[in-house]
Amino acid sequence: MIEEMMRSVLEQDRSAVVLCDLEHTIVYMNPAAEKNYAKYGGGSLLGRSLLSCHNEESCQKIRQVLAWFAADRQNNMLYTGKNEKQNKDIYMVALRDRDGALIGYYEKHEYRNAETAERYDYSQSLV
């Protein structure tokens, strides 16, 4: 049941969520990610290397962050930049198993825009 709940959390998130394994293979994209990255192939990116979507400098940074995650179980989240156009901060986050072993990573987007919906307005869906 918890796995279904976790999948639902990801599916309902309005931010793009792309999960990668330790080989940088894209193993999951939520609907927001498929939409956000549609011009790059959207859902067809599943099974492909995340590194093929970035320039060499970015690939080097991604590898460095992954090495930092692997170096210590306390290394779990790193600020990687700000997107001024979309008003968001960007982080890389380690994914670990129950024993704390590194099993992958994802990029977290924290938007700074205030919500524009009215409180408890049932007439609109936000997802």
Image (cartoon, rainbow, N blue to C red):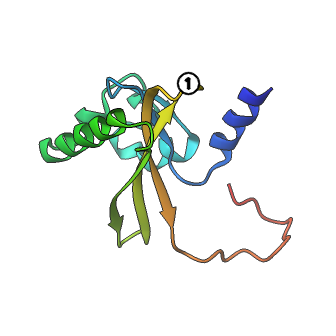
In the rendered view, would you say 24 is above or below 14?
above
Q: Residues within 10 Å of mark 1 (few under 14, many from 20)?
A: few
Tell whether 121 sits left or right of 127: right
Q: Residue at x 54, y 53 (%)?
A: 15
In the rendered view, would you say 52 is above or below 88?
above
Q: Nearer the viewer, residue 27 or 40?
A: 27
Name the quarter where the C terminus is drawn: bottom right
Residue topped by disc 1: 99
Q: Nearer the viewer, residue 125 or 17?
A: 17
Q: Residue at x 31, y 37 (%)?
A: 66
- SS for tag 1? loop
Q: Nearer the viewer, residue 31 or 65?
A: 65
Q: Position of residue 121 (x, y in %)?
A: 84, 70
User: Disc 1 marks which amino acid?
Assistant: Asp
Q: Residue at x 47, y 25 (%)?
A: 101
Q: Nearer the viewer, residue 92 or 18?
A: 92
Q: Position of residue 58 (x, y in %)?
A: 20, 46
Tally of numbered discs: 1
Tell whether 33 sits left or right of 48: right
In the rendered view, would you say 16 is above or below 59?
below
Name the quarter where the N terminus is drawn: top right
Q: Position of residue 26 (x, y in %)?
A: 40, 29
Q: Position of residue 28 (x, y in %)?
A: 50, 30
Q: Residue at x 72, y 74 (%)?
A: 117
Q: Residue furthest left?
A: 56
Res 62 quadrant in image: top left
Res 84 quadrant in image: bottom left
Tell whether 127 sits left or right of 69: right
Res 125 quadrant in image: bottom right
